[in-house]
Amino acid sequence: MRHSFFRSRYFVAVVAAVLGAAVVAAVGLAGAWTTTVQTDSKPAVLRVVQTYAGNFDSGWHSHSGIAIVQVTKGSLVITEGYDCKPKTVAVGDSFFEVPYTPVRAVGLGEIQWTTTFVLANEEPTTIPVSKSPCP
Protein backbone atom coordinates (compact mmCIF):
# COMPACT_ATOMS: atom_id res chain seq x y z
CA MET A 1 0.00 0.00 0.00
CA ARG A 2 1.41 3.33 -1.06
CA HIS A 3 1.29 6.33 1.26
CA SER A 4 -0.07 9.39 -0.55
CA PHE A 5 2.24 12.32 0.05
CA PHE A 6 -0.29 14.76 -1.44
CA ARG A 7 -2.88 13.81 1.21
CA SER A 8 -0.51 14.05 4.14
CA ARG A 9 -0.62 16.76 6.82
CA TYR A 10 2.95 17.66 5.94
CA PHE A 11 2.00 18.48 2.36
CA VAL A 12 -0.98 20.59 3.47
CA ALA A 13 1.25 22.50 5.92
CA VAL A 14 3.88 23.17 3.25
CA VAL A 15 1.27 24.41 0.76
CA ALA A 16 -0.31 26.66 3.41
CA ALA A 17 3.10 28.10 4.34
CA VAL A 18 4.02 28.79 0.70
CA LEU A 19 0.68 30.46 -0.01
CA GLY A 20 0.93 32.51 3.17
CA ALA A 21 4.45 33.63 2.28
CA ALA A 22 3.29 34.57 -1.24
CA VAL A 23 0.46 36.71 0.13
CA VAL A 24 2.77 38.45 2.61
CA ALA A 25 5.35 39.07 -0.14
CA ALA A 26 2.73 40.43 -2.54
CA VAL A 27 1.35 42.82 0.08
CA GLY A 28 4.84 43.89 1.19
CA LEU A 29 6.15 44.44 -2.34
CA ALA A 30 3.11 46.27 -3.65
CA GLY A 31 4.40 49.64 -2.42
CA ALA A 32 7.98 48.93 -3.41
CA TRP A 33 7.15 48.14 -7.04
CA THR A 34 5.03 51.12 -8.06
CA THR A 35 6.25 53.18 -11.00
CA THR A 36 5.25 56.33 -12.86
CA VAL A 37 6.06 56.68 -16.54
CA GLN A 38 7.20 60.25 -17.25
CA THR A 39 8.12 59.73 -20.89
CA ASP A 40 7.48 56.84 -23.21
CA SER A 41 9.39 57.74 -26.36
CA LYS A 42 9.56 55.79 -29.54
CA PRO A 43 12.23 55.89 -30.75
CA ALA A 44 14.84 57.03 -28.25
CA VAL A 45 17.78 59.08 -29.48
CA LEU A 46 21.35 58.60 -28.33
CA ARG A 47 23.38 61.82 -28.62
CA VAL A 48 27.06 62.00 -27.61
CA VAL A 49 28.53 65.48 -27.12
CA GLN A 50 32.21 66.16 -26.41
CA THR A 51 32.96 69.52 -24.78
CA TYR A 52 36.20 71.37 -24.13
CA ALA A 53 35.97 74.55 -22.05
CA GLY A 54 37.81 76.86 -19.72
CA ASN A 55 36.28 78.26 -16.53
CA PHE A 56 32.90 76.74 -17.33
CA ASP A 57 29.52 77.41 -15.67
CA SER A 58 26.51 75.67 -17.20
CA GLY A 59 23.99 77.68 -15.20
CA TRP A 60 20.96 75.93 -13.80
CA HIS A 61 19.29 73.65 -16.33
CA SER A 62 17.70 70.23 -16.67
CA HIS A 63 17.60 67.46 -19.27
CA SER A 64 14.56 65.75 -20.75
CA GLY A 65 16.31 62.40 -20.58
CA ILE A 66 19.30 60.72 -19.00
CA ALA A 67 22.61 62.60 -19.19
CA ILE A 68 25.79 60.65 -18.44
CA VAL A 69 28.87 62.82 -17.92
CA GLN A 70 32.42 61.40 -18.22
CA VAL A 71 35.26 63.80 -17.38
CA THR A 72 38.49 63.34 -19.39
CA LYS A 73 40.41 66.47 -18.28
CA GLY A 74 40.12 68.63 -15.17
CA SER A 75 37.04 68.36 -12.99
CA LEU A 76 33.47 69.58 -12.71
CA VAL A 77 31.56 70.38 -9.56
CA ILE A 78 27.99 69.21 -10.21
CA THR A 79 25.07 70.20 -8.00
CA GLU A 80 21.63 68.67 -8.42
CA GLY A 81 18.55 70.48 -7.19
CA TYR A 82 17.05 67.59 -5.24
CA ASP A 83 19.77 67.58 -2.55
CA CYS A 84 21.86 70.71 -3.36
CA LYS A 85 25.08 68.88 -2.38
CA PRO A 86 27.99 69.64 -4.75
CA LYS A 87 29.80 66.56 -6.07
CA THR A 88 33.22 66.75 -7.72
CA VAL A 89 33.51 64.70 -10.89
CA ALA A 90 37.19 64.31 -11.85
CA VAL A 91 39.13 62.59 -14.64
CA GLY A 92 37.93 59.02 -15.02
CA ASP A 93 34.72 59.64 -13.08
CA SER A 94 31.20 59.42 -14.46
CA PHE A 95 28.03 61.09 -13.24
CA PHE A 96 24.39 60.29 -14.07
CA GLU A 97 22.07 63.30 -14.17
CA VAL A 98 18.44 62.60 -13.30
CA PRO A 99 15.93 63.61 -16.00
CA TYR A 100 13.92 66.79 -15.31
CA THR A 101 15.99 67.57 -12.20
CA PRO A 102 17.69 71.00 -12.07
CA VAL A 103 21.46 70.69 -12.25
CA ARG A 104 24.46 73.04 -12.47
CA ALA A 105 28.05 72.17 -13.47
CA VAL A 106 30.99 74.45 -12.71
CA GLY A 107 34.64 73.91 -13.60
CA LEU A 108 37.77 76.02 -13.14
CA GLY A 109 40.64 75.93 -15.59
CA GLU A 110 40.67 73.62 -18.60
CA ILE A 111 37.98 70.95 -18.58
CA GLN A 112 37.05 68.29 -21.10
CA TRP A 113 34.13 65.90 -20.86
CA THR A 114 31.74 63.79 -22.85
CA THR A 115 28.01 63.85 -22.22
CA THR A 116 25.89 60.98 -23.48
CA PHE A 117 22.20 61.83 -23.72
CA VAL A 118 19.37 59.31 -24.04
CA LEU A 119 16.35 61.36 -25.11
CA ALA A 120 12.96 61.12 -26.71
CA ASN A 121 13.17 61.73 -30.45
CA GLU A 122 12.32 65.44 -30.51
CA GLU A 123 13.25 66.52 -26.98
CA PRO A 124 15.93 69.18 -26.40
CA THR A 125 19.18 68.14 -24.71
CA THR A 126 19.11 71.10 -22.31
CA ILE A 127 16.22 73.01 -20.74
CA PRO A 128 17.16 76.29 -18.97
CA VAL A 129 15.98 76.68 -15.38
CA SER A 130 15.29 80.32 -14.47
CA LYS A 131 15.71 80.08 -10.69
CA SER A 132 18.19 78.21 -8.50
CA PRO A 133 16.49 75.45 -6.51
CA CYS A 134 19.26 75.64 -3.88
CA PRO A 135 19.70 78.23 -1.14
Image (cartoon, rainbow, N blue to C red):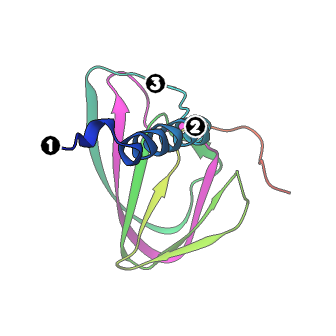
Query: Is 54 rendered above or below residue 123?
Result: below
Query: Which image quadrant for residue 80?
Result: bottom right
SS class, disc 2: loop
The amino acid pointed to by label 3 is Thr
Q: Position of residue 102 (x, y in %)?
A: 64, 45
User: Dividing the picture into quarters, in which one does residue 7 lie?
Assistant: top left
In magenta segment, residue 112: yes
The quarter of the picture where the N terminus appears is: top left
Q: Main secondary structure of the magenta part?
A: strand
Please identify the quarter of the rendering in which residue 78 is found.
bottom right
Q: Is residue 130 above or below residue 37?
A: below
Residue 41, placed above or below residue 84 = above
Q: Secondary structure at mark 3?
A: loop
Identity, as a three-letter code, of the amino acid under mark 1: Arg
Q: Residues within 10 Å of mark 3 (few under 14, many from 20)?
A: few
Tell me the residue at 28%/19% (across/down): 42
Q: Is residue 133 left or right of residue 95?
A: right
Q: 66 or 112: nearer the eye?
A: 66
Is 131 one of the magenta-colored residues? no
- Disc 1 element: loop
Q: Is residue 38 left or right of residue 11?
A: right
Image: magenta residue range? 100-127
Question: Which dot, 1 or 2, sits closer to the camera?
Answer: 1
The residue pinned by badge 1 equals: 2
Which part of the image, by quadrant, shows the C terminus?
A: bottom right
* Real-space Cα separation, disc 3 to disc 2, in angstroms: 11 Å
Real-space Cα separation, disc 1 to disc 2, in angstroms: 66 Å
Amino acid type at circle 2 is Tyr
Nearest the eye: 22 or 18: 18
Q: Which residue is mark 2?
A: 100
